[in-house]
Amino acid sequence: MMHLLLKFAAICRSGDLRVSTSEVIDAVTHLQWVDFSDETGFKAALKANFAKSRREQGNFDRLYHLFFHEMQTSTALDPDGEQTVEQRQIITQLQENEMLTDPIDSALIDFLKGDPAAFLQEIYNLENREEYSSPALKSNLGQLSARLAVMLRINALKGAIGEANTGGRSGDSQSAERLLGRLDRAYKMLTEDNRPNNDALKKVRSNETHFRDIGERSFAALSPAEIVQMQEIIKKLVRKLRDRMGRRYAAGSRRYLDVKKTLRHSGRFQGIPIEIKYRQRPLKKTKIIALCDVSGSVWSAARFMLNMLYSMQDCFSAVHSFAFISGATDITEIFEKYEADKAVEKVLSSRKIEFGALTDYGEVFQQFRRHHMHLVNKRTTVIIVGDGRSNYHNPREEILADIREKSRRIIWLNPEPEDFWHTGDSEINTYKAYCHEIRPCRNLNQLVDFVEDLVL
């Protein structure tokens, strides 16, 4: 059992689960109190030690089912788990085949033997490989072509198994069928979607109407006169929200008698509470990082979002803003130096932003992690304003997962109609697994709902 447990721990590590030596030792200790014939208790003991968060539980279930059921590793749980003599003979012939010389072939042969660790590591490397293509041809085609190469090796291995099974004996045929079934499982693992589920994702669809006519107009459809009108509405709204926040902080700064500290401090004066101690628990302000897509109609929503955030800076501990199309550009200093309307003009005329480039969210996230990740901590709310359309470039969702781990929460505001969120080159379905909240933000009413929830 110890050998089986160590092998499963290695499989979990290859499948992107962080399993330490101490956790394996804890699992061994817990399994001493579990009846191995009760698979529910056996699985629960392993899951409690190897899956440390709810987001890891889905990956654990997948690896557990693969190792103990589909690979048929444990004879205690699966009487048919032992390899037959015919299977070993076929695998030996595959290892001696001069056509199977690709490095991935050895991982696939190990997979046929019942050890998926090397193949899982290959899949993990494919999903997280760096792309070094030219700036003009940035895409995830390198990853797709690598997957295609693995598919071709699987097909080659299937052909080799067919050639090895030329005797026609029933035992050989059954063994070959089982090996081909395992290769089918390897093919499925290569093509299936391994994105984690996000049951806690908050999807907000606001139906509240604050401003009847202009409040329901899409940002992209506003005329110049309506933009001026909306700016006046936003200024009045900001003053109202700042007043409400001011009253809240004033109430939070009130001092309340701390009886325990007062009595402890009175020991210096023979038990007489000469000096009164108070509890002071001021409200902690949130730190904001805004990543705003400035391409096309998306910028129409981003400009009003930034306008409101910088008009209410005293409600946050800090506001850092980045505009992006194919790369992240820090525009924090522009909004701190100029009034909101003037700052918008400065951003639109900035030479640092490549307005003629194609949107590339993966490159933006990579640049942000490389240069600005130090700004993110557990008091940071990351706001992303964009439609998630990355022109079929590599989405680099693993970087968004890193940002999620270090931040308080990630909120995605999408100015596109919800019916179009998962069409064409939209990667919203990919990114939503790493967000805490997704909101539509196409008009003033939806923007007001979001800002009120953010600051109040």
Image: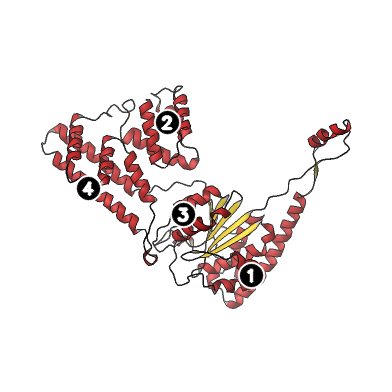
Label 2 vs 1, first from the N-terminus: 2
Label 3: element kind: helix
Q: How many residues crowd around disc 1 within 10 Å: few (fewer than 14), some, or many (20 or more)?
A: many
Q: CA distance from mark 3 to mark 4?
A: 32 Å
SS class of the residue under badge 2? helix
Residue 435 vertical placement versus 231 (above, below): above
Q: Which residue is mark 1?
A: 340
Q: Calculate the distance from the C-alpha at mark 4 to the C-alpha at mark 1.
A: 60 Å
Quarter of the rendering containing residue 66: top left
- Check disc 2: other Cα within 10 Å, few if <14, some if 14-19, many if 20+: some
Image position of 38 (left or right of 201):
left
Q: Which residue is mark 3?
A: 431
Can the viewer see residue 201 in this picture? no
Indicate the amino acid at tag 2: Lys
Residue 348 visible here: yes
Q: Which residue is mark 2?
A: 43
Crowd band around label 3 with a 10 angstrom C-alpha radius: few (<14), some (14–19), many (20+) = some
Q: Position of residue 223 (x, y in %)?
A: 57, 76
Name the disc covering residue 155, or none.
Answer: 4
Q: Tag 1, which secondary structure?
A: helix
The answer to whether the residues at label 2 and label 3 have Cβ atoms under 8 Å apart is no
